[in-house]
Structure formats: structure tokens, C-alpha cells
Image (tube, grey):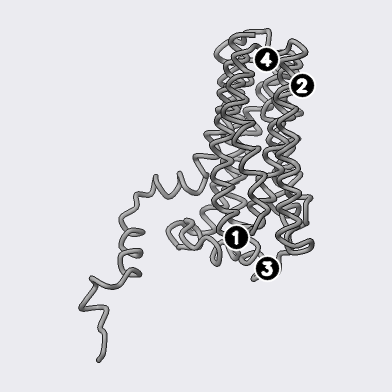
Amino acid sequence: MIFNWRVDKSYNPTYFTIMAKRKRKPIEEWANLIRWKNTGVALACVAAALTLGETRLPCIVKLLIYSAVGLIFAGGNVINDYVDYESDAVGHPNRPIPSGTIERKIALIMGIVFFIGGVLFAALGAINYGPIPALIAIGAALLLLFYDFIGGKIPFVGNFAVAILGGLVFIYPGSVQGLTKKHIFAAGFAVLIHLGREIVKDIADRAADESVGIRTLPSIIGDTKAARLASACLFLIVPLTILPYFIGVFSVWYLGTAILFVDLPIILLAWLFPVGVTARKASKFASDLKWIMIGGLVALLLGGLTS
């Protein structure tokens, strides 16, 4: 019996996948390419950071900060997809570049435009709030480029670079307002959760990375040891989130929210994660950590508003 998929499409999942891609709007593809959820979380971190300072900033200054962070992150994400298109073709074939819905060359051009725009907004901000914050933002942009082209292919170095970038999202607005202990604790939380999550993501993507010759930390020490290291980073978040309350930095509203939506989920998930770790389990855990990040942001917002 000969199956003609051109005639009978009802049992061909590939056909419907292709049709679904064709029906996507260009704006949806670009939103996926800039990783709008991740970029949105970065902007939410800026919003949280702005509540932690003792100085209230003019709207124009806030707009410059949001624009710099949003465009630099969006550009970095696009350039990262441009660089990683080979491994994405194996591990994430539905991404806009490997799926062919956005041309790789066009993506690079737009990534550069976004990136330069963000750096220009950061430089423009120096007129309003001095050179130090602008240098921090530009340094973060250079670190992001380093990660995209070099660091992401070096075991642990790429993970640590992303973690530092996560912390700088709080340090940059804080340097504009006047850096406080609240900003520093928030940055520490961001560094640890990003470091743990990046290692988890490397476990999930190990097969795809190895298929194109990229050796990440799990490739060297094994998935189980990498999972234990990720869990250790995450466990360190627990004392770091509790300490600020006891030294008078944050309020009880912050503490209750942090324990309920950050510490308890981390203790449970990080304890179970190294047991029988698989790529699928790692992918699920990486998604769960996004929700814990949001819980942390809510705690910081409450801490900034009530402390």
C-alpha cells in the first residue's frame, strides 16, 4: 500500500507543522527571535530595581534605562540565534532562523541595529546621570557579545557570563539611583538563579550542542554532576533571600513572598533534580525556574515598596 501524503494530509503531522509555520505572522516570528519573554523579564527586573532605590527618577531617565536594557537584550538574543543556528537546527528546529521563517542574514542585520540602538540609549543617558551607569550598560553589552560569539562555547564561562548579565540588570538602574544594599542583594539572587538555570539548560541541550562540536559543562563532568552543581547554586539562594530581612534591608512582606514563591519551590525542585536527571527533566526544570524568577521579582517589588 502506497501512502500519498499530498492527497491524504489528515495523518501527516509534518504537513500541519509546515502549515502552522506558514500561518505565523512576521511580528510573531520576530517576537520569538528576540525571545520576548526573556526580554520582558529583563525589563521587569529593571522595574523592580527602580523600586529599590531611594531616589525617584524622572520619566525620561527611566525611559532611557528601559530602552537601553530592552534593545541590548533583544539584539543579543537575535545575534545569539544567528550564531547558534546549527545547534538550534537540531535542538530547536522551530526557532525562526533554522525553520527558515526569518533569513539568517536579515536577523544579523536587525540584531546589530537593536544592539547599537541600546548602546546609544545607554550613552545618551550619560548626559542625564553621568558616565558610570553608561559604562556599566556598555560593559554589559560587550559581555553579551562575548557570550554570543565566544563564551557560550566555553564550558562554565558562558554560564557565568549570563549570570553576571542577570545581576547587572539590577546594578545598572541602581547605579543611576544610587546603589543600595537592596540592589546588591537582588543582583546576588539574579546571579545565582541564572547560573543554576544556565547549567540546567546546558543539560537539556547537551545532545544538540555535541552534534555540532560544542562541549558544555555537562559534556565534561556528566549530567549528574552538572545537575548537582546547578542545585548547589540554587540552594545558595535560600539564605541569600532570608538574610536581608534579618539585617533590616527588606520588610516582612518581602520575606513571606520570598519564602513562599522562591525558597520552598527551590528546596523541593533542586533536591529532586539530580535524581535520574534527563534532558527532558532538565528542560522542564528550566521552565519551572522561570516561574521562580517571577516569584522573586514579586518579592523584590514588595520589598522595594514596603521597606
Q: Position of residue 283 (x, y in %)?
A: 56, 53
Could you give the CA–CA distance between mark 1 and mark 4, rounded to whole angstroms?
Answer: 47 Å
- Vertical arrangement, residue 220 with respect to residue 247, above or below: below
* Comes first in the chain, label 3 or label 4: 4
* Comes first in the chain, label 1 or label 4: 4
Q: Which label sits on residue 210?
A: 3
Q: Say few, some or many: other residues with alpha carbon within 10 Å of mark 1 (under 14 / 14 to 19 / 20 or more).
A: some
Q: Amino acid at mark 1?
A: Ala
Q: Which label sits on residue 105?
A: none
Res. 64 image quadrant: top right
Q: Position of residue 99 (x, y in %)?
A: 46, 62
Could you give the CA–CA distance between mark 2 and mark 3, rounded to whole angstroms?
Answer: 42 Å
Tell me the SS state at disc 4. helix
Q: Which numbered disc, 3 or 4, marks the residue closer to the eye?
A: 3
Residue contact at pointers 3 and 4, CB within 8 angstroms: no
Could you give the CA–CA distance between mark 3 and mark 4, rounded to whole angstroms?
Answer: 47 Å
Q: Which residue is mark 2?
A: 131
Q: For the point 52% across and 34% down, which residue is it?
A: 40
Q: Which label sits on residue 279?
A: 1
- Vertical arrangement, residue 149 with respect to residue 65, above or below: below
Q: For the point 55% across and 37% down, which residue is it?
A: 39
Q: Amino acid at mark 3?
A: Glu
Q: Which residue is mark 4?
A: 128
Tell me the SS state at disc 2. helix
Could you give the CA–CA distance between mark 1 and mark 3, rounded to whole angstroms?
Answer: 13 Å
